[in-house]
Image: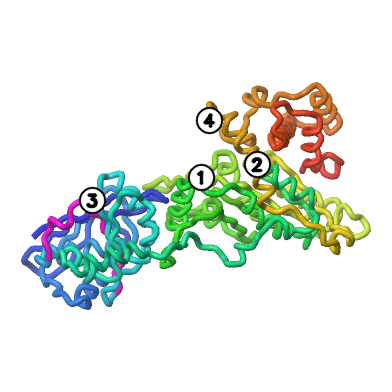
Amino acid sequence: MYCKLICGTLIGIKGTMIEVEVDISEGFPKLDIVGMAGSTIKEAKERVRTGIKNAGYRFPYKRITINLAPAHIRKEGVAFDLPIALGILCCEGVFHKRKLERCLFIGELALNGDIRPVKGVLSLVDEAKKNGISRCIVPYDNLREALMIENMEVVAISNLNEAVLFLKNDKKTMEYLQRLTRNVPEIISIKNDSDKYLDFNQVVGQKKAKRGLEIAVSGMHHAMLIGPPGIGKTMITKRVKTILPPLSRENIVELTKIYSAAEKLISSNKIIGERPFRNPHHSITRASFIGGSSTGKPGEISLAHNGVLMLDEFPEFKREVIESLREPLEQGMIILSRSQNVFTFPARFILIAAMNPCPCGFYPNLNKCQCLPSELARYQNKISGPILDRIDLHIEMTPISYEKISSDSLEESSCDVLSRVLVAREIQKQRYKDEKISYNSELTASTISNYCITSDSAKTLLENAYKSLGLSSRSYHRLLKVSRTIADLDSEEVINSIHVAEAVTFRSDKSGASNKL
Ligand SMILES: [Zn+2]
């Protein structure tokens, strides 16, 4: 007996359809899996054998051959358990093989016959849809992910028996499973309950930092927060996502694929409906930061896609980690290659790097700062020029006065800030509709002159700044791009001196405190 089912494997965050062929013939009892199967799939033998028995079916003592096609793709994952088990039962005549057509099967089998959730379900179901498959049978705990794909019949099962009864056209089971799919609880995303109450108005004072972050978000500029420890760099950065526009459906699908492939959604039955905030520790390795080329698992920079990546104590990160930011900061994605596969992970985030002004944290307060000039230089030199060149805004945070901290004047809410951000973003959308870019931060040296039209007074100011601060041409372009965003926040097409003047305040070389930053 022979039958064929469709399953899938993940390559990065992209699904690929795999055919599972099952053949059972008389002969020495043996189960072979061929077709470049990874170790997790080889182990499926034991799970399938025991799972079938414990679900109440007879496991055939015959020669069983499983072939996974196409053979040139390396397959990994536990999602093949379900199609292998169903293939064996179908060959044994438990149900008709016509029921297996145009259907995707995914699920890990537990020894007692239960079906466990797996990673990457959304990517697999999406790919199935593109291949003309109209029905998928998935683990119940992955139901939410599968339902993201429109015009797909989703059947969610909790154990092998439910799958078999469904394929046998058992009326009661079919009705029960349909009811289950219809009544899935409406859970949108994983987030901490405390996140719900984050708002910019909880940050007292720090007007300059708030304004800087508003500009960063409006033009998708990366920013650096510089200030002594305990000043609230993390507190304010955590709230940046509250001034970012809501995610589109397309964004939600993309983010959910990333989190699912990173095994962050297993058994949560959730999707990612809000912008991420990632805050990895400075001891992080390069592989968990950019993603593993051996595992094909997305890293922190991809988990921050469409959201905020905060790197606190920025100079403390390993040099190779900091340098690995170059490609994502430039292209909004990262490409990892390994011998057989090339993974492309999206990684378009707002980088907010935070650092102390010096190793002890008190510079430029020379009464308190104990650092030697050489220590100071070494600290600041840890971040290379090419990375600094990609960080448009340098925001200094200073301690707030007692009057401010004790006053109960009302701070502006995230909602108010967001309304201005949305205006600035809409202006950019219209302006760049015929270009390949979407935001001011993406302007290049060649396009900058088309879109950064300056008034005469702004020109004078720029010239003065260029000469007195000794700007490089790159720094000059950064200044212009930030001025462009500030003008957009004012809904002005021409950049005025007031916009340039504000942009200059977001450069820490304005006072000559550091030549590098
Ligand atoms: Zn110091």
Within-10-Å neighbours for mark 4: few <14, some 14–19, many 20+: few
Residue 69 bears which disc, if any? Answer: 3
Residue at position x 59%, y 42% in the image: 329
Q: Earlier in the sequence, mark 1 or mark 3?
A: 3
Question: Mark 4 to mark 1: distance in Å?
Answer: 19 Å
Q: Which residue is mark 2?
A: 218
- Element under label 2? helix
Direction from residue 229 to residue 33 in the image, left or right: left
| 371 versus 14 height, above or below | below
> From where the camera sits, is residue 474 visible?
no
Q: Earlier in the sequence, mark 3 or mark 2?
A: 3
Which quarter of the rendered picture does the C terminus lie within? top right
| 138 versus 432 height, above or below | below
- Element under label 1? strand
Q: Is residue 134 magenta?
A: no
Question: Mark 3 to mark 2: distance in Å?
Answer: 47 Å
- Element under label 3? strand
Range covered by the magenta-colored residues: 95-110
Residue 334 bears which disc, if any? Answer: 1
